[in-house]
Amino acid sequence: MCGIVGYIGNKDVDSVILVGLEKLEYRGYDSAGIAAIHEGELFIRKRKGRIVDLYSLVNGKPIKGNVGIGHTRWATHGKVTDENAHPHTDCNNTIAVVHNGIIENYIELKKELTERGHVFKSDTDSEVIPHLIEENYDGDMLEAILKTIKKLKGAFAFVVISTLEPDKIIGVRMASPLILGVGENEMLFASDIPALLSHTKKIITLDDGEIVVARQNSFQIYDFEGNPREKEIKEITWEADMVEKEGFPHYMLKEIHEQPKVFVKNIASYLKSGEPQILKDFNLRRILLNKNEFYIQASGTSLHAGMIGTYMVQDLARVKSVAEYSSEFRYKNPVFDPRTLVVAISQSGETADTLAGVRLAKKNGLDVLSIINVQESTIARESDYVIYINAGPEIGVASTKAYTAQLLILALLSLEIGYLKGYIPDDELKKYVNELKTLPEKMRVVLSHEAQIQHIAEKFYNANNFMFLGRGINFPTALEGALKLKEISYIHATGYAAGEMKHGPIALVDENLPVVVVAPKTSVYEKTISNIQEVKARGGRIIIVATEGDEEVKEFGEEIIYVPETLEIFTPILSIIPLQLLAYHIAVLRNCDVDKPRNLAKSVTVE
Ligand code: AGP
């Protein structure tokens, strides 16, 4: 999961590439580099470290040119070193390549190339690409790359520049994302939309098996056989300022605070006539009404949303529903019924495991609906139906606003199907719709407790372990709260079904263990209070997310974070916000890199 940028045009390539890499740093940030061609010579600047380190390298040794490539790395093969940073070059320093993905047969390729005299400078898989191009080059760069591709196995999105043909930049896509930005008198490549937004909103998302030869004023797409291919230019709706921090110290905090605005936008868009209008596509409406099972598959935070979705779909639409990790689903050889709808939930729309789940479902002839944030992403384009969550670019690696937007879409979808099937009478639908419209304000009320949550973070940020508990529709809320904490603060955190504590995990409870319990007023509230008492009896330090006005919890909780009352089905939307803020402030107190946590990347595009 690396970030790639490429440029050809009139601007100084160093500023375009470096700023573009900054916008993609969430995709990987252990090393970075840039290459440019100037007056027939290829210049490379690369090193381990963050983009800020690359800036200082380039400031010390400026690089010029109007055609260049850049890369920010999430190491797969080869340690984090200067030599293993991209770009990689051929033996003659005339061809430079940046690559995202995994070349599965690189060991044999590298062996053959070395036997034929090629000298390697890194121990990465990616470096075989420029050496193969060098070997295949016979006066036509496109031909050389087409021959090279035929030898590569695995996932690769790569961009090539060369002093041999300095008037072009070539991008290739196979199983890793790559987008062409079509500008005025300039062309760009990028792994993801944010790197393009300040230059153009006209994009072409490449499909697997496509290669683009781009010049300053033109481009031509080919398939891997060299046959020309025409593709439509799409106009994206995101604005450049959407990928700025707007005064917040971190993207994650900005995105936590953006959640009410995302709800307002989606409610206006999907609740026009007072009825949920998710299923604008009549064909999708017909399909969904005939499904007897929703099989939700997703990863990480998106899977937690999917788990909550199963409660919503079953309660409101009365359709059987399961949620499964994509990484398990894809290898399970599941038994499918033709009336099963596979639902893929993904913020990035590029998660390899979730994409593989979509392809498995399609191979078995099933309809696939995807709930996606990034426009024109691979999962969106390979699904039969797409519902966009319209959360805007989510830059922080820890997903927050996309998660609650996913929950909103799942709730609206469940309400609409339940209503169309006659399970939800008009007056009950009105009750849900009216409550939905109050959620943005209720989210703002929760956000107004940030100072209290920061105080709680100051009490517990040195803990080595945390436990999160929840029941019913808020069991996944506990899982999500634990994931938020562990992925940005590196504290070991377990999320558990509160009712399961007595079957083992309660052995963990002692006076050193902070236990966060999600206990809003729902149908399982009393049961959850019993679980809190079990923890209290064993000395656990209890933090409770409770419904405003609940006085009973004060007897058990060392800290109480109140959230406004809402309908049970919407409690996960309000209850997760304190946990997002708690994780954020603990991570800041532990001096962790909140937006770019160690070992992680925003979009996991490899297995
Ligand atoms: C979320 O905080 C994590 N960064 C991660 O679990 C993420 O949700 C997961 O990788 C799925 O990503 P997707 O939604 O883009 O498919």
Image: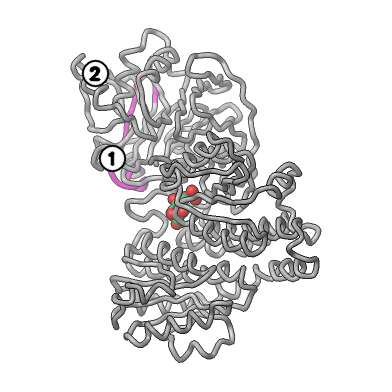
Amino acid found under the numbered disc labelled 1: Arg
Amino acid found under the numbered disc labelled 2: Leu
Q: Residues within 10 Å of mark 2 (few under 14, many from 20)?
A: some
Q: Do the CB atoms of the residues marked 2 and 1 lie less than 8 Å apart? A: no
| Quadrant showing the C terminus | top left
Residue 460 placed where, x, y %?
Answer: 35, 77
Determine which of the numbered discs, if any, sits on residue 590 in the image: none
**Does 215 sit above or below residue 499?**
above
Residue 273 occupies which quadrant of the picture? bottom right
Q: Farthest residue in the top direction?
A: 138
Determine which of the numbered discs, if any, sits on residue 47 in the image: 1
Q: Select label 2 or label 1 by which is in front.
A: 2
Residue at image point 38% right, 37% down: 71
Q: Which residues are magenta?
A: 37-54
Q: Is residue 22 visible in the rendered structure shown here?
A: no
Reading the image, the residue beneath label 2 is: 113
Residue 17 placed where, x, y %?
Answer: 44, 37
| Quadrant showing the N terminus | top left
The answer to whether mark 2 is within 8 Å of ligand 1 is no
Marks 2 and 1, how far apart in space?
Answer: 25 Å
Residue at image point 59% right, 60% down: 407
Q: Is residue 546 visible in the rendered structure shown here?
A: yes
